[in-house]
Image (spheres, rainbow, N blue to C red):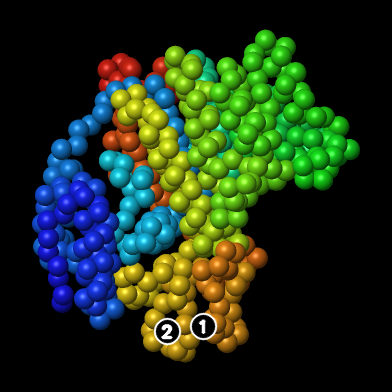
Amino acid sequence: MVCITFLLSACMDFSKILWRSIGKLGISVLETRLPLRISLTHLICLSVFVHGVVSESPETWWTVGQDELRDTLKSKLNHNIAKNVIVFLGDGMGVTTVTAARILKGQLDGKSGEEGYLHFDRFPHTGLLKAYSNDKQVSESSASGTALFSGMKVNSETIGLDSSAVPKECKNSHLHHIDGLLLWAQQAGKSTGIISNTRVVDSTPASLYAHTPEEDWEVDSAIPASQRELGCKDISVQLIDDLPGRNINVILGGGRLSFLPQNHLDEESNSYGKRLDGRNLVEEWMHDKRRRNASAGYMQNKEDLKNMANAENEFLLGLFNPEKMSFAWDRGDSSPEPALDEMAVAAVRVLRRNPKGFFLMIEGGLIDDAHHRGMAANALHETIALDKAVRAIDDCTHENDTLLVVVADHSHSLLFLGYQKRGTSILGLANAKKAADGKPYTSLLYASGPESPLNTPRLNISGQDTTAAGYRQPAFIPSSWAMHMGEDVPVYAKGPMSHLFSGVHEQNYFAHAINYASCYRSDLLNACNSGQFANNTGN
């Protein structure tokens, strides 16, 4: 094996000259991005291609292992109270998605990929959450979101209702309402915000403020007439009319048509609203804020968002798409839609004006949307977009008083398999020699989805561009949507009390840990009264 050992220099010009010189010698070198914590004075053996294989010397791996150990031993627990809490929720972002996105991010930077890290990979505390619902082994966003944010596992397809509620049945559902972190934060005097690049009334954001026996009842026209007559409110109305929805300071995302009446033309999309009741909820939101003498702004594009966030507004409502927002890969710099990190930074700019602090949830919901369509590349780009938002917020907050938590609500049936050489495109083809039929297959596959060849000969995909935007990975079980996976989901945490998220826990534990770190509810065990509850877990 060819190995070049030298002392790393801080001078990038020298490094570039060296790479060019090596290239003239006919040696193909792949510069590896080693963990940033490795000292520039360490002697390492760089990655090289030997017979087409990326490899490191034994000394390199020994150095990496020792340095990671030293960093771990240096870490100290942060027992501060969390003044601010920011939750980044990757919808459908299971462990395989994180691994593949990490590799793609590195390869987009011109590296092998496997040795890299997402920003939140570096958070000091990680754990797993058991993501089954009260009644299903494999959960979905509404039940998972309610568990995460209310502290109780509930039945699948319901939002904000305890496990006694009957899915899709409006009758008596009002007797089973449960509250959660967003209301608790408001009652503690905090400002609050929700961001989603799907619809702001989609299952995950709705689980913070709504109560409904059916997650799809986002607008009144989606509720069967028989159930409307029993008094069930659609999710959009709850966001505008009810608590805690109407007290949310920042609401950013898509879903504009759910707020507009059916006779109202949305000029930007040339589409009509969806509401049967004739209400224009955007106008009603503005009227409510004027009635309360609160400064407020409504936005439909990223320029408006920038201007409104810089102004002294207490409330922001941004609906940037009639439905879900656009995939990051499809959205160019000229797009009127803000990116997830732009929405996140704008929200923090507004929320941090409250001296008591804030609670903010930021959802990368299009990860799930892309996975359901079997579009792995889009899902990975959405994961990288969420990671970009994490980094942006980490850069503008302080770990002394701000708890950052990255979590998934459920996993997806994405598979990463084969025995590919290091540096192989994560969106490319695996080794066809390992398949019994000799046909190539993509490194990423789905256990279920629309591209299933079940009961038919497997398609030869050797001529397809598997790296193209919108490419659908092959799947095994045929289904119109790729289904969720039932495995445990990851959680990454940094800041006050972040060590509470280490280990394996039930999914509903998440809300209890957040409440402990932030002291929202004094009647429950928290960091402010732990002595009082030393022998009593509270109610």
Q: Residue flagged by tag 1: what amino acid is it?
A: Ser
Spot occupied by residue 369 in the image (x, y as percentages of width and height): 59, 54
- Tell me if 352 is positioned left or right of 494 in this view: right
Measuring 41% from the left and 50% from the top, which residue is drawn there? 489
Q: Residue flagged by tag 2: what amino acid is it?
A: Ala
- Tell me if 495 is positioned left or right of 410 in this view: left
Measuring 85% from the left and 39% from the top, which residue is drawn there? 265
| Local SS, label 1 | loop
- Residue placed under numbered mark 1 in the picture: 462
Spot occupied by residue 408 in the image (x, y as percentages of width and height): 46, 47
| Local SS, label 2 | helix
Spot occupied by residue 281 in the image (x, y as percentages of width and height): 76, 29
Q: Can you tell which mark lies on residue 50?
A: none
Measuring 31% from the left and 56% from the top, which residue is drawn there? 116
Q: Height in image: 48 above or below 440?
A: above
- Residue placed under numbered mark 2 in the picture: 432
